[in-house]
Amino acid sequence: MSGRLAIVGLGPGDNRYLTREAADALEVAEALYGYGPYLDRVPDRPGQSRHASDNREEGARAEAALCHAAGGANVAVVSGGDPGVFAMAAAVCGAIEAGPEAWRAVDIAVVPGITAMLAVAARVGAPLGHDFCAISLSDNLKPWDVIARRLEAAAQAGFVVALYNPVSRARPWQLGEAFAQLSRYLAPSTPVVFGRAVGRDDEAVTITTLGKAHEMEADMATLVIVGSPETRLVQRDGRAPLVYTPREAAEVSA
Ligand code: SAH
């Protein structure tokens, strides 16, 4: 008998950002799988088992959840933000692709959530108001050369760039290198937004420029948005400026 596996996005912070669909999927699950701090955001329910694992064990977690669901249970795997953005939905698809035939019979539901770049953008205005892309700076799963080439192409093409996974203890230099790479094509005055722990109690959002971005602190809970040549600030008396990218674009200068 094949069960159900819901891959649920919790949004960026507290439960205000959880969709109704996600809350329902968590409510009916018999078993929950996920990275410990994400599972901690889900209220305890009697009769529901919890299986916490380390952040770096996405593949093993996907397999364990699929095994459980293939046995007939209603299982949920949780992700921060959206499960399809640098998260568990792709890990589950990959496990199904490589796994036993029986896993293809499991009913899979991907339940979207508000991804970090949308939450950060919303705090400052509309930096993602025109064409943009998202790049993970983690070189655990791809070589740095690939990342550097994508940054270069994005800057040359005039995309606003959202940088996920900017730094970790094992990856201290990548963000500085990314700013250096982008600075070859973008002016020092280009707006840059640092959003840390958005939607949580310790949220901090700072607006700076590409020329000064290297002076800023960032950690694993930070998302960085680097503007395009069109991105600008609207200054307001007594209020934080609005950062926005207008919906009309000029010629790309490359
Ligand atoms: N699936 C997640 C992203 C996972 S990758 C999502 O859709 O948001 C993890 C990275 O997401 C972090 O290194 C950070 O860059 C970003 N991130 C996740 N939650 C965040 C938050 N509340 N505030 C700012 N950035 C966040």
Image: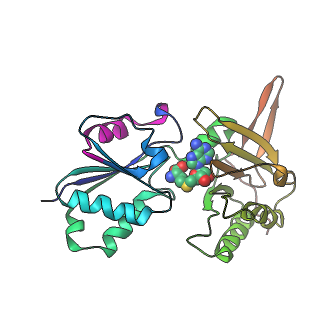
Q: Residue at image x 53%, y 47%?
A: 115
In the rendered view, does 101 fall on the left or right side of 121? left
Q: How is the image coloured?
A: rainbow
In the rendered view, does 75 fall on the left or right side of 205? left
* Rendered location of residue 197, percent (x, y): 62, 41
Q: Residue at image x 82%, y 60%?
A: 186
Task: Count the numbered circles shown.
Answer: 0
Task: Note whether residue 111 is visible.
Answer: no
In the rendered view, does 11 fall on the left or right side of 229? left
Of residues 117 and 125, the one drawn nearer to the viewer in this rendering = 117
If the image is split into quadrants, where does the N terminus sit?
A: bottom left
Residue farthest to the left, as pictured: 1
In the rendered view, does 19 fall on the left or right side of 135? left
Quadrant assignment, res 252: bottom right
- Specify the segment rendered in magenta: 16-31
Query: Considering only vertical position in the picture, is 174 above or below 24?
Result: below
* Rendered location of residue 124, percent (x, y): 69, 37
Residue 216 belongs to the span the image colors magenta:
no
Q: Residue at image x 73%, y 69%?
A: 152
Decide whether the magenta segment is chiefly helix, strand or loop.
helix
Of residues 241 and 49, the one drawn nearer to the viewer in this rendering = 49
Task: Note whether residue 182 is visible.
Answer: yes
* Rendered location of residue 16, percent (x, y): 48, 30
Query: Considering only vertical position in the picture, is 240 above or below 175?
Result: above
If the image is split into quadrants, where does the C terminus sit?
A: bottom right
Residue 29 belongs to the span the image colors magenta:
yes
Query: Considering only vertical position in the picture, is 238 above or below 68?
Result: above
Q: Residue at image x 28%, y 47%?
A: 31
